[in-house]
Image (cartoon, rainbow, N blue to C red):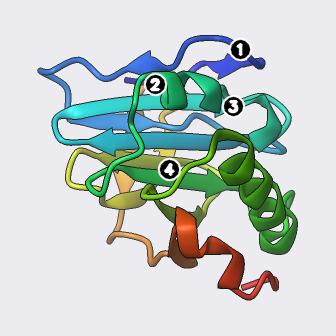
Amino acid sequence: MVMEMQFLNRPWQTLRWDDDEVFTNSLGDCVACVMISGRTVLGYHGKGGIEAVNFGQIAKMGYDGAQTKMIVVYAPAQTQFSNLHDKVLGIIKEHNFKLIEWIYYASANAVVNRNRQVRAAEEDRKTRQWKAMGNPLPHKCKCVSQFAQWVQAKNI
Protein backbone atom coordinates (compact mmCIF):
# COMPACT_ATOMS: atom_id res chain seq x y z
CA MET A 1 0.00 0.00 0.00
CA VAL A 2 1.25 3.47 -0.82
CA MET A 3 0.02 6.12 1.61
CA GLU A 4 -1.86 9.13 0.31
CA MET A 5 -1.30 12.59 1.81
CA GLN A 6 -4.18 13.34 4.13
CA PHE A 7 -5.46 16.29 6.14
CA LEU A 8 -6.84 16.08 9.67
CA ASN A 9 -9.88 13.92 10.40
CA ARG A 10 -9.57 11.66 7.38
CA PRO A 11 -9.78 7.90 8.05
CA TRP A 12 -6.59 5.88 8.37
CA GLN A 13 -5.71 3.69 5.39
CA THR A 14 -5.91 -0.05 6.08
CA LEU A 15 -3.26 -2.46 4.81
CA ARG A 16 -5.01 -5.35 3.08
CA TRP A 17 -4.46 -8.80 4.55
CA ASP A 18 -2.65 -9.95 1.38
CA ASP A 19 -0.20 -7.02 1.40
CA ASP A 20 2.81 -6.84 3.71
CA GLU A 21 4.24 -3.36 3.16
CA VAL A 22 3.25 0.25 3.67
CA PHE A 23 5.14 2.89 1.67
CA THR A 24 5.09 6.32 3.29
CA ASN A 25 5.44 8.20 0.00
CA SER A 26 7.72 11.28 -0.05
CA LEU A 27 7.49 13.08 3.27
CA GLY A 28 8.98 16.57 2.95
CA ASP A 29 7.35 18.44 5.86
CA CYS A 30 4.79 15.65 6.38
CA VAL A 31 4.93 12.89 9.01
CA ALA A 32 3.81 9.31 8.37
CA CYS A 33 2.44 7.05 11.10
CA VAL A 34 1.94 3.31 10.80
CA MET A 35 -0.05 1.65 13.59
CA ILE A 36 0.46 -2.09 14.02
CA SER A 37 -1.65 -4.07 16.47
CA GLY A 38 -1.76 -7.82 15.96
CA ARG A 39 -2.62 -8.40 12.26
CA THR A 40 -4.13 -4.91 11.90
CA VAL A 41 -1.93 -2.36 10.10
CA LEU A 42 -3.15 1.19 9.55
CA GLY A 43 -1.30 4.05 7.86
CA TYR A 44 -1.65 7.83 7.84
CA HIS A 45 0.46 10.35 5.89
CA GLY A 46 -0.22 13.62 7.72
CA LYS A 47 0.04 16.56 5.33
CA GLY A 48 2.12 19.24 7.02
CA GLY A 49 3.10 17.26 10.12
CA ILE A 50 1.92 15.02 12.91
CA GLU A 51 -0.85 17.50 13.82
CA ALA A 52 -2.70 16.35 10.70
CA VAL A 53 -2.81 12.69 11.79
CA ASN A 54 -6.22 11.50 13.03
CA PHE A 55 -5.28 10.01 16.41
CA GLY A 56 -8.90 10.38 17.54
CA GLN A 57 -9.77 7.41 15.32
CA ILE A 58 -7.07 5.28 16.99
CA ALA A 59 -8.44 6.21 20.42
CA LYS A 60 -12.05 5.49 19.39
CA MET A 61 -11.08 2.12 17.95
CA GLY A 62 -9.43 1.13 21.25
CA TYR A 63 -5.92 0.56 19.95
CA ASP A 64 -4.18 1.63 23.18
CA GLY A 65 -2.87 -1.84 24.05
CA ALA A 66 0.45 -3.34 25.02
CA GLN A 67 0.82 -4.90 21.56
CA THR A 68 0.15 -1.63 19.71
CA LYS A 69 3.13 -0.05 17.97
CA MET A 70 3.01 3.44 16.47
CA ILE A 71 5.81 3.84 13.96
CA VAL A 72 6.46 7.53 13.28
CA VAL A 73 8.55 8.38 10.21
CA TYR A 74 9.74 11.93 9.63
CA ALA A 75 12.11 13.62 7.18
CA PRO A 76 15.06 14.81 9.30
CA ALA A 77 15.85 17.66 6.89
CA GLN A 78 12.40 19.17 7.57
CA THR A 79 11.47 18.06 11.09
CA GLN A 80 13.49 18.16 14.32
CA PHE A 81 13.01 15.25 16.68
CA SER A 82 12.58 17.52 19.72
CA ASN A 83 9.68 19.41 18.10
CA LEU A 84 8.07 16.18 16.90
CA HIS A 85 8.37 14.50 20.31
CA ASP A 86 6.83 17.53 22.05
CA LYS A 87 3.83 17.25 19.70
CA VAL A 88 3.55 13.51 20.37
CA LEU A 89 3.48 14.24 24.13
CA GLY A 90 0.50 16.53 23.49
CA ILE A 91 -1.23 13.80 21.44
CA ILE A 92 -0.65 11.23 24.20
CA LYS A 93 -2.15 13.59 26.78
CA GLU A 94 -5.09 14.66 24.58
CA HIS A 95 -6.15 11.06 23.85
CA ASN A 96 -5.06 9.60 27.20
CA PHE A 97 -2.88 6.96 25.56
CA LYS A 98 -1.08 4.74 28.09
CA LEU A 99 0.33 1.63 26.41
CA ILE A 100 1.10 2.46 22.77
CA GLU A 101 4.79 2.05 22.01
CA TRP A 102 6.02 4.96 19.88
CA ILE A 103 8.99 4.24 17.62
CA TYR A 104 10.59 7.10 15.68
CA TYR A 105 12.50 6.77 12.40
CA ALA A 106 14.17 9.46 10.30
CA SER A 107 13.77 8.94 6.55
CA ALA A 108 12.48 11.07 3.68
CA ASN A 109 10.78 7.96 2.17
CA ALA A 110 10.28 4.65 3.92
CA VAL A 111 8.61 1.27 3.76
CA VAL A 112 7.23 -0.43 6.88
CA ASN A 113 6.41 -4.12 6.85
CA ARG A 114 4.11 -6.12 9.12
CA ASN A 115 7.12 -7.26 11.18
CA ARG A 116 7.80 -3.60 12.07
CA GLN A 117 10.95 -3.36 9.97
CA VAL A 118 11.49 0.07 8.48
CA ARG A 119 13.71 0.59 5.45
CA ALA A 120 14.43 3.51 3.19
CA ALA A 121 12.44 3.47 -0.05
CA GLU A 122 12.64 5.00 -3.47
CA GLU A 123 10.25 5.43 -6.37
CA ASP A 124 11.16 4.11 -9.82
CA ARG A 125 10.50 7.15 -12.01
CA LYS A 126 9.59 5.05 -15.06
CA THR A 127 7.19 2.57 -13.46
CA ARG A 128 6.06 4.85 -10.57
CA GLN A 129 6.48 1.84 -8.26
CA TRP A 130 8.04 2.12 -4.81
CA LYS A 131 10.72 -0.32 -3.63
CA ALA A 132 12.56 -0.87 -0.37
CA MET A 133 16.31 -0.27 -0.26
CA GLY A 134 19.04 -1.69 1.94
CA ASN A 135 19.00 -2.88 5.51
CA PRO A 136 16.42 -1.94 8.15
CA LEU A 137 16.87 1.57 9.52
CA PRO A 138 17.81 2.04 13.18
CA HIS A 139 15.11 3.67 15.28
CA LYS A 140 15.88 7.12 16.67
CA CYS A 141 13.85 6.71 19.83
CA LYS A 142 11.41 4.26 21.42
CA CYS A 143 9.01 4.96 24.29
CA VAL A 144 5.74 3.77 25.79
CA SER A 145 3.00 6.42 26.09
CA GLN A 146 2.87 6.52 29.88
CA PHE A 147 6.66 7.03 30.13
CA ALA A 148 7.18 9.23 27.05
CA GLN A 149 7.57 12.43 29.07
CA TRP A 150 10.89 11.12 30.42
CA VAL A 151 12.49 10.86 26.99
CA GLN A 152 15.01 13.63 26.54
CA ALA A 153 13.50 15.71 23.77
CA LYS A 154 16.69 16.63 22.01
CA ASN A 155 17.53 16.27 18.37
CA ILE A 156 18.68 12.64 18.28
Percent position of residue 35, x then y: 42, 41
Side of 68 where 85 appears, left or right: right
The residue that label 4 is drawn on is 110
Per the model, the C-alpha gap separating discs 4 and 2 is 10 Å
Percent position of residue 93, x then y: 72, 52
Q: Which residue type does callout 4 highlight?
A: Ala
Per the model, the C-alpha gap separating discs 4 and 1 is 23 Å
Give the quadrant of the N terminus. Answer: top left
Dot 1 falls on a residue whose secondary structure is: loop
- Which tag is nearer the camera, tag 4 or tag 1? 1
Residue at 27 percent of width and 42 percent of height:
37
Marks 4 and 3 close (CB-CB < 8 Å): no
Marks 4 and 1 close (CB-CB < 8 Å): no
On residue 9, the disc is 1
Q: Which residue type does callout 2 highlight?
A: Val
The residue that label 2 is drawn on is 2
Mark 1 neighbour class, 10 Å CA radius: few under 14, some 14 to 19, many 20 or more: few
Give the mark, 3 or 1, whose residue is nearer the N terminus: 1
- Which of 123/41 is in front? 41
Give the mark, 4 or 2, whose residue is nearer the N terminus: 2
Per the model, the C-alpha gap separating discs 3 and 2 is 16 Å
Residue at 16 percent of width and 35 percent of height:
39
Per the model, the C-alpha gap separating discs 4 and 3 is 17 Å
Side of 67 where 76 appears, left or right: right
- Which tag is nearer the camera, tag 4 or tag 3? 3
- Which tag is nearer the camera, tag 3 or tag 2? 3
Q: Which residue type does callout 1 highlight?
A: Asn
Marks 4 and 2 close (CB-CB < 8 Å): no
Image quadrant assignment for residue 130: top left
